Image (cartoon, rainbow, N blue to C red):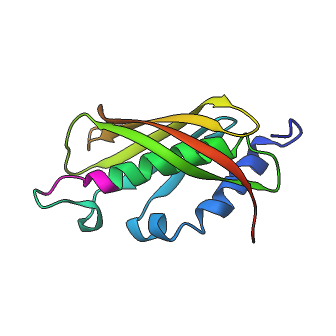
Amino acid sequence: MDASVTPSELFQRIEASFARQGMMQHLGARLVRVEPGLCEVALPYSERVTQQQGGFHGGAMGALADIAGGYAALTVAPEGMEVTTVEYKINFLAAFQGGELRATGRVTKAGKRIIVATAEVAHVDASGKLSACALMQQTLVPVPKTY
């Protein structure tokens, strides 16, 4: 990423792409924080994100982790490029109901051909207490923007 990009411009770049994420919009996710090599996304508990026992669905957790890691990677990708996930592995640590999930993606290694990122997913309860929920590692590739 260009060092002359301000924190506000970086947030706006990621926010503009995030707004085009139909699935995240449908699930009610929101962008919380963007820094070079980092992105945090929140997902409130709702009927859209539950499994049959009433807890957050693993698919929703995986999607949230993928988005957080992907946007962390986008913060270090060159202007005019997007990123695409080519694989990820996730460990589910605990199930939760209510509150919201917070996924924090971090770039581990940014190369020219691949970017490796991780995401930690935490549950935030009504009192603000954080509990580990899932851990994800992913590999992404920079691709030219097509829009």
Q: Main secondary structure of the magenta part?
A: loop
Magenta stretch contains residue 56: yes
Q: Is residue 48 left or right of residue 2?
A: left
Residue 49 image-quadrant placement: bottom left
Quadrant for the N terminus in the image: top right
Residue 8 location, x and y as percent? 75, 47
Residue 50 image-quadrant placement: bottom left
The answer to whether residue 100 of the structure is visible from this angle is yes
Q: Which residue appears at 57% of the width and 47% of the height?
A: 70
Could you say which is closer to the camera, residue 139 or residue 23? Answer: 139
Q: Is residue 136 left or right of residue 21?
A: left
Residue 98 location, x and y as percent? 22, 51
Could you say which is closer to the camera, residue 45 or residue 118? Answer: 118
In the image, farthest residue toward the right: 4
Q: How many marks?
A: 0
Q: Is residue 58 left or right of residue 145?
A: left
Residue 51 location, x and y as percent? 18, 59
Quadrant for the C terminus in the image: bottom right
Q: Which residues are magenta?
A: 54-59
Magenta stretch contains residue 88: no
Residue 131 image-quadrant placement: top left
Could you say which is closer to the camera, residue 81 or residue 50? Answer: 81
The answer to whether residue 41 of the structure is visible from this angle is no
Residue 108 location, x and y as percent? 59, 27
Q: Which residue appears at 41% of the width and 64% of the height?
A: 28
Q: Does 73 appear above or below 31?
A: above
In the image, farthest residue toward the top: 108
